[in-house]
Image (cartoon, rainbow, N blue to C red):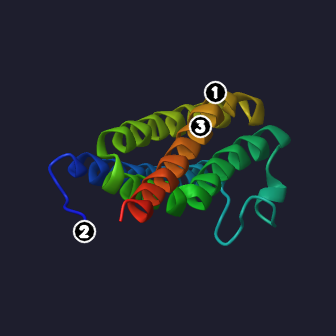
Amino acid sequence: MFSVGPGYYWNIGAATLMGLQCFYAGQRVYLARVKYGVEYPDMGSGRYAAKLSDKDWKEFNNIMRTQQNYVEQLPICISSVLIGGLFYPKMSAVLGGIYILGRAVYSFGYSRFGPQGRWAGVLMVDLSLLGLMVSNLVGVYKKLTSG
């Protein structure tokens, strides 16, 4: 069986920060809705958004897309950092930290410069997630084959 030691608390912290980052992204969407006058339930392509200038519409949608992308990945990154912490707590926590930093870079770049501005963050996010998932599979394999 697994025992959770003090090193695992870093993984719990990383998972919690991921959740807080996603919450923050949602707050940015709310503030963008207020700034651009895009009322609910408009997701950036409806009746209210149609009244925006092209520049404002693009800025609003960049902020909205950043948050939607995070929500799409949040279950994968949180579960990966917590599962990975059972096998490799330090490496998993570090990869979780890289993911958090990459997500911040992604969010800043996308909201400021559009889709082209997200690539540095995409590399950090995707490579850290890939590292987490591969280490999870290696950990499972080792446990299954060790007896």
Q: Secondary structure at mark 1?
A: helix
Q: Disc 3 designates what residue?
A: 127
Real-space CA distance between mark 1 and mark 3, rounded to the nearest whole angstrom: 11 Å
Where residue 34 appears, as percent x and y from the top left, is 57, 54
Disc nearest the viewer among 2 and 1: 2
Q: Is any part of residue 35 visible from this angle?
A: yes
Q: Nearer the viewer, residue 6 or 72?
A: 6
Left or right of 109 in this view: 143: left
Mark 1, residues whose alpha carbon is within 10 Å: few (<14), some, or many (≥20)? some
| First in sequence: mark 2 vs mark 1 | 2
Residue drawn at (75%, 58%) of the image: 44
Q: Is residue 132 above or below residue 71?
A: above
Find the residue positioned furthest to the front.
Answer: 147
- Which residue is rendered at x = 41% and y = 51% of the image? 18
Query: Of residues 19 and 33, which is closer to you in this image?
Result: 19
Distance from disc 2 to disc 3, alpha carbons, whole Å, reads 29 Å
Q: Where is mark 1, residue-wise?
A: 120
Q: Amino acid at mark 1?
A: Ala
Horizontal and vertical percent position of residue 63: 64, 46
Give the image quarter of residue 46.
bottom right
Quadrant occupied by the C terminus: bottom left
Residue 76: x, y in percent?
Answer: 53, 59
Task: Name the residue at 25% across, 68% down.
Answer: 1
Q: Nearer the viewer, mark 2 or mark 3?
A: 2
State how far apart marks 2 and 1 are (Cα): 39 Å
Residue annotated with mark 2: 1
To which quarter of the image does residue 124 belong? top right
SS for callout 2:
loop
Amino acid at the residue labelled 3: Leu
102 and 30: which is toward the camera = 102
